[in-house]
Amino acid sequence: YNASSGLNQPNDNAPCWLGNTNTDWEGNYKVQYWSNDWQTTILDYLDKIIDAGFDGVYLDIIDGWEYWSDDSNGESFSIASSTAASHMINFVKRIAYYARVTKGKPNFYIFPQNGEAILDHDTEGELLDTISGIGIEDLYYDETNGIDTAETNERIPYLDDISTDGKPVIVVDYADDDTGYSGANKTRIDDFYSKVQTKGYYPYVALSDRELDEINSISGLQE
């Protein structure tokens, strides 16, 4: 237990690939995702996903490579950005190969969530060739607050590269304040839908509480 942060941290008995507690999500930890022990753990879990009949996976924390390339990450080391990104790209490729080739599911979907700037390091286009599409959060709205246009515009070129490659870009913004599809809430939701569809992406408006415990249904719009 770290008194200054108020968070539990791994002790000396933890696996060598386990990093610090994720300060944004207590009970979750950073991992050295390039470790073979960690990757085989994930592939073992992927067996369960495939055996349960799922058609793909949605991969969060693709941008974890940025953490390990940050020399102020609070760990005992950091690695070069290009190396960290390359490790992540190879990990995604390994997941895809295992599902599509080893397990015989050639159409298995691989959808990373966020972390689209990793495409800067995808110099051979291997990641773009591997993924089925991408899921994006907070492109136009951070809950009920509009995202700065400059921030959105930094992300758009990456998303356009994926879309131009014929792969879906799914945008999830938590812009519905749960007051019903009327008034200011409707105006915000309609604005979100308009912006996303104008780009040729696929919109989904989620509830602003971010509980992720239900499918958000809006009569006549999102059912």
Image: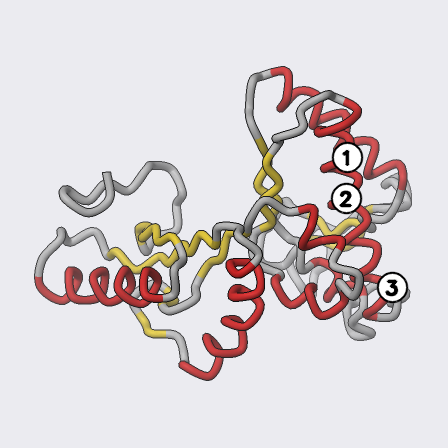
Q: Are marks 2 and 1 in contact (CB under 8 Å)?
A: yes
Residue 80's spot in the image, x, y percent?
Answer: 87, 70
Q: Position of residue 196 (x, y in %)?
A: 35, 62
Q: Nearer the viewer, residue 1 or 65?
A: 65
Q: CA distance from mark 3 to mark 2?
A: 15 Å
Q: Position of residue 78 (x, y in %)?
A: 87, 67
The amino acid type of the residue labelled 2 equals: Lys
**Looking at the image, residue 17 lies above or below residue 153:** above
**Which residue is rendered at x = 29% and y = 64% of the image?**
192
Query: Alpha carbon of mark 2 to alpha carbon of mark 1: how far?
Result: 6 Å
Q: Residues within 10 Å of mark 3 (few under 14, many from 20)?
A: some
Spatial CA distance of label 1 from label 3 is 21 Å
Give the SS element for disc 3.
helix
Which secondary structure, mark 2? helix
Q: Which mark is residue 93?
A: 2
Circle nearer the N terminus (1, 3): 3
The residue where tag 1 is placed is 97
Left or right of 189 on screen, residue 110: right
Residue drawn at x 44%, y 52% is 170
Vertical side of 150 occupied by 205: above or below: above
Indicate which disc, 3 or 2, sits on the residue closer to the N terminus: 3
Left or right of 155 in this view: 223 = left
Quarter of the image holding residue 190?
bottom left
Which residue sits at x=27%, y=60%?
Answer: 193
From the top left corner, tell me how far across and down residue 92 is, in percent.
Answer: 74, 45
* Cβ atoms under marks 1 and 3 closer than 8 Å: no
Q: Amino acid at mark 1?
A: Tyr
Residue type of the residue flagged with mark 3: Thr
Q: Is residue 119 above or below residue 129?
A: below
Q: Nearer the viewer, residue 16 or 195?
A: 195
Residue at the farthest bottom position: 150
Q: Which residue is mark 3?
A: 83
